[in-house]
């Protein structure tokens, strides 16, 4: 666009900024911010909440919380979205205390929290392990803020309880929450069972419920097979694999993406089709040997 001699306006730039955030393209986001400053676009629109929110959101999603806070503090007008972005930014980076501090400042400023605020707040409690605060916020949503919790809020709390090892409490909330069942909750419980490795029975209940909700989805079976494998129950792993074959379930191949010199490379598990595979393997082979350190491992390729 610039090479064609067309000068982007604020509509263009605020459209591109969210893309920078989603891709964690911090350098490109900074360049856009700099372009806006150099060309006086921010001076003429310094009070525009949408523009400032786009900048704060970009920096927060790129993990640059210092610049996100700087832009946020410079804003004369802050709406609920402004506060939500900062709460979410700190929460995702496991800065729970700062997220809760932003929420306190939000309330002190007279800005009413909404459903999105509490999703961000509960996620912050989840990532930082603030179980008591998470419980309290869920309870206060209706009683203090007159906001009815949704499936997203319950899912956050159930995941928080599961990560903290409170599996029975997570299960109880999952079966009693008044918003209806959803697969995300049971995948979260199943993942927590694998994380703590001490409740095969609950994991099997979660897999059964997942199959009822998503009979064609293999994710629950894969998680359960990993749990069996880590517990040494290889016979159960093979039985589960046979059940998947009988139901014609297929595991989606795991893949990874990496950007090198502005070029995106995609890798799939056991993939040998990359044009530079031999060079990559020459680097990975000694690294793999070093990681294993001469120890013996039992690998089931279907579940790696």
Image: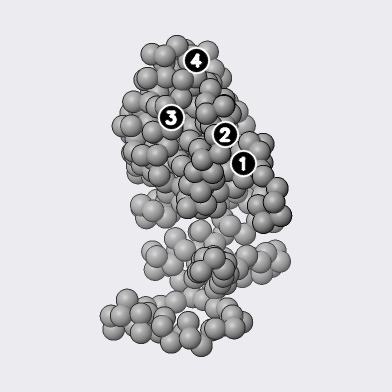
Mark 4 = which residue?
Answer: 112
Q: In the displayed structure, does residue 19 sit left or right of residue 59?
A: right
Q: Nearer the viewer, mark 1 or mark 4?
A: 1
Percent coordinates x, y for residue 164 in the rendering: 34, 42
User: Mark 2 vs mark 1: which is more N-terminal?
Assistant: 1
The residue under the point 41% across, 83% down is 283
Circles 4 and 2, Cβ within 8 Å, touching? The answer is: no
Residue 271 in view in this figure: yes
Q: Nearer the viewer, mark 2 or mark 1?
A: 2
Other-residue count near label 4 (Cα within 10 Å), few / some / many at <14 / 14–19 / ≥20: few
The residue under the point 44% across, 67% down is 229
Query: Please, is residue 228 above or below residue 81 in the view?
Result: below
Percent coordinates x, y for residue 29 in the rendering: 51, 47
Give me the C-alpha separation between circle 3 and circle 1: 18 Å
Tag 2's secondary structure? Answer: helix
Query: Please, is residue 3 above or below residue 240 in the view?
Result: above
User: Mark 1 vs mark 4: which is more N-terminal?
Assistant: 1
Circles 3 and 2, Cβ within 8 Å, touching? The answer is: no
Give me the C-alpha separation between circle 4 and circle 2: 30 Å
User: Mark 3 vs mark 2: which is more N-terminal?
Assistant: 2
The residue under the point 37% across, 19% down is 105
Q: Nearer the viewer, residue 6 or 75?
A: 6
Mark 3 = which residue?
Answer: 72
Circles 3 and 1, Cβ within 8 Å, touching? The answer is: no
Mark 2 = which residue?
Answer: 41
């Amino acid at each position: 666009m610039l090479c064609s001699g067309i000068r982007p306006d604020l509509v263009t730039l605020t459209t591109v900024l969210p893309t920078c955030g989603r891709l964690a393209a911090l350098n490109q986001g900074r360049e856009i911010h700099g372009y806006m400053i150099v060309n006086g676009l921010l001076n003429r629109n310094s009070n525009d909440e949408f523009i400032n929110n786009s900048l704060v959101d970009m920096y927060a999603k790129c993990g640059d919380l210092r610049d996100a806070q700087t832009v946020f503090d410079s804003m004369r007008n802050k709406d609920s979205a402004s506060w939500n972005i900062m709460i979410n930014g700190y929460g995702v980076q496991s800065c729970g205390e700062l997220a809760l501090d932003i929420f306190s400042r939000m309330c002190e400023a007279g800005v009413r929290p909404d459903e999105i605020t509490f999703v961000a707040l509960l996620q912050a409690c989840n990532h930082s392990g603030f179980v008591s605060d998470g419980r309290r916020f869920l309870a206060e949503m209706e009683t203090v803020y007159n906001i009815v919790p949704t499936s997203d809020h319950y899912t956050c709390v159930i995941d928080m309880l599961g990560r903290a090892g409170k599996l029975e409490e997570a299960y109880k909330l999952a079966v009693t929450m008044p918003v209806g069942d959803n697969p995300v909750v049971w995948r979260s419980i199943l993942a927590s069972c694998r994380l703590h490795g001490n409740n095969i029975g609950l994991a099997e209940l979660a897999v059964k419920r997942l199959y009822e909700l998503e009979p064609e989805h293999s994710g629950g079976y894969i998680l359960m097979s990993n749990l069996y494998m880590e517990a040494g129950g290889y016979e159960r792993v093979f039985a589960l694999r046979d059940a998947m074959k009988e139901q014609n379930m297929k595991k989606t191949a795991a893949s990874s993406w990496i950007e090198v010199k502005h070029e995106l490379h995609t890798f799939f598990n056991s993939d040998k089709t990359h044009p530079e595979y031999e060079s990559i393997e020459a680097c990975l082979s000694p690294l793999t040997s070093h990681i294993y350190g001469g120890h013996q491992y039992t690998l089931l390729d279907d579940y790696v």
